Amino acid sequence: MSETDPSQLVPYVTGGAFLLAFVFGAVGNKTNFCTMGAVSDWVNMGDTGRLRMWLLAMAVALLGSSALQLAGLVDLSKSIYPGPNFTWLSYLVGGFLFGVGMTLGSGCGSKTLIRVGAGNLKSLIVYVFLGIAAYMTLRGLFGAFRVGVLERAAIALPMGQDLPSLFASFTDLDKRTWTAIFAGTIGGALLVFVYWSKAFRSSFDYTLGGVVTGLVVVGGWYVSGVVGHVAEDPNTLQEAFVATNTGRMESFSFVSPMAFTLEYLMFWTDKSRIVTYGIASALGVIVGSAAYALATRSFRWEGFRDAEDTANHVVGGLLMGFGGITALGCTIGQAISGFSTLALGSIMTFLAIVAGSAATMKYQYWRLSASE
């Protein structure tokens, strides 16, 4: 595609992102795919059904993305996740705060979009505050703290932080071989664990939600990394990935896209602004969820219960916006898209998110018990 005008590829990239996100939104609504709910079911009731659905999505994304990598179609090292700057404190703090926020806000970024499409006005408020906090963390007040404090705690890994690169640097096996080994071993182990449960095997929705979510992430890599890839931009004479906010190959993540969507709406008349991969994906999830809700007559307007409920959702949105940008992603962006690159930071962020969410639930339960 080196002779292609990059601007001609924009509709294909944004259109592909929208369609994939539409499918995710509809299926996520149908199957009640919710990472916060997955942690809640596990912590509060010992039910691992939705947690296994999340892990299934991770396994499918890992196996599919690794297949694209091994086939030479994409180079996942050109995404933001396996970069050499291992900001371990940002992953831990950002992930933990995101976990706290998604519990207070009744769902992560993707669930917020799904709930907005289904008529939940509480999630619309979460969307706005999440987007504002995310933008402030990218380029504003919170960003100064992120860069000046958290990102100072970093380890430089010249070979990259993905597991295949790390192991290839001190063994005789190359990165390609390690990619196959890790993808097969980790992906296979996750599949065995997921389907070990008879209750999980008996639910079609669990499998549908996990498989579709994982495939959507794989499709996202293909859209931005193949369809939107320009080997040599005629304007810059450099490699380019069309219509991505990072300028790199992207798959699905829903924190920074919320910020960029608000920015796009506020600067609507600025002709230099375009609908990007992330903006199209956020819109796609909402529309897909709304389409399913309307088709099944499950669309319902829902508002806040009281002032405390309002405050929890506002704070939850703020924490998710800050945490998601600081940790370079959310329960989809890091825990599935990032995990599919086998980045060490993505694995760390996933664990930190679960820890933050579980700790908040335990605190809420303790507080409720103490008040009785």
Image: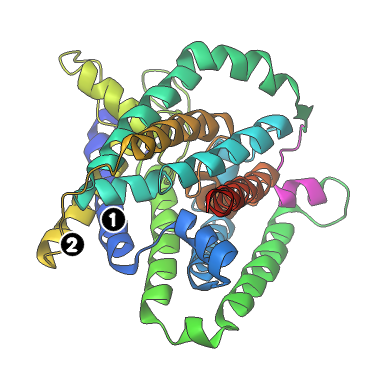
* Residue shown at the point (78%, 46%) measured from the top left: 166
Quadrant assignment for the N terminus: top left
Residue 281 place in picture, x, y as percent: 31, 43
Q: Residues within 10 Å of mark 1 (few under 14, many from 20)?
A: many
Residue at the spot 28% in from the left edge and 61% down from the top edge:
29
- How many numbered callouts? 2
Residue type of the residue flagged with mark 2:
Tyr
Disc 2 packing (10 Å; few <14; some 14–19; many ≥20): many
Residue 14 placement: quadrant: top left
Dot 2 falls on a residue whose secondary structure is: helix
Per the rendering, the mark at residue 25 is 1
Q: Residue 5: tell me if it is visible.
A: no
Q: Is residue 165 magenta?
A: yes
Circle 1/circle 2 CB separation < 8 Å: yes
Q: Secondary structure at mark 1?
A: helix
Q: Give percent across and percent down for residue 265.
A: 21, 23
Q: Decide which of 53, 306 is in the foreground and name it.
A: 306
Write down the residue under mark 2.
292
Q: Which residues are magenta?
A: 158-168
Front position in the image: 44 or 85: 44
